[in-house]
Image (spheres, rainbow, N blue to C red):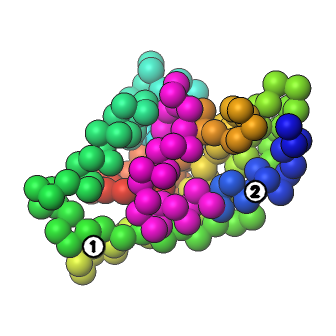
Amino acid sequence: MTAITEKNLIDFVYAEARILDEQRFEDWLTLFTEDAYYWMPLAHDQQDPRLHTSLMYEDKLLLRVRIERLTGQRTFSQQPKSRSHHLLQAPTVESSDAGTGEHVVRTAFLYTETRLDAQTTYAGWSTHHLVEVEGTLKIRLKRVDLVNCDAAFGNIQLFM
């Protein structure tokens, strides 16, 4: 088995953003472990997604349901489809443990989502908790912290 390098971790984050921007949602879902979560806190420095309300806290099943809704023929809120663009700062490896195969990568971003005449930009940080599974990297937790997480939002249609 090949050791995971810092470059592998950084490339993973860039590749994940590209998959999302290309709307390859099924491919994106395969990047997650079966026990994974996608978390978007509602408060700055929120420590627990279960004891406090979050903008999103979705396990793999809920992510799959959202993907099915996004790609469904009868999803009129996606006709025409929303599009996204991730602009990422260089990711930084916060921790990496070859012994346990667990890694944490943090990335500042600007994210733009658009549909018809509406365009919304979000700024924040994503933190990927990655694990090695059978020689490949998988997401166990993706935490997306928005700068203005406590603002009133319209519908966020896609994934940051």
Up/down of 98 relative to 80, above or below: above
Give x and y (percent) for residue 158.
37, 57
Outermost residue on the top side: it is: 51
Q: Which residue is mark 1?
A: 115
The residue positioned 69% from the left and 54% from the top of the image is 12
Give x and y (percent) for residue 144.
53, 46
The residue positioned 60% from the left and 50% from the top of the image is 126
Q: Quadrant of residue 143?
A: top right
The count of marks equals 2
Q: Quadrant of residue 109?
A: bottom right
Q: Which residue is mark 2?
A: 10
Closer to the camera, 22 or 94?
A: 22
Query: Does residue 12 appear left or right of residue 115 in this picture?
Result: right
What distance separates the C-alpha of mark 1 from that of mark 2? 29 Å
Q: Secondary structure at mark 2?
A: helix
**Magenta residues (range):** 15-39
Up/down of 78 relative to 32, above or below: below
> Label for residue 89?
none
| Residue 21 forms part of the magenta stretch | yes
Outermost residue on the bottom side: it is: 117
Check disc 2: other Cα within 10 Å, few if <14, some if 14-19, many if 20+. some
The residue positioned 20% from the left and 54% from the top of the image is 72
Q: Amino acid at mark 2?
A: Ile
For the question of whether residue 43 can be seen, the reply is no
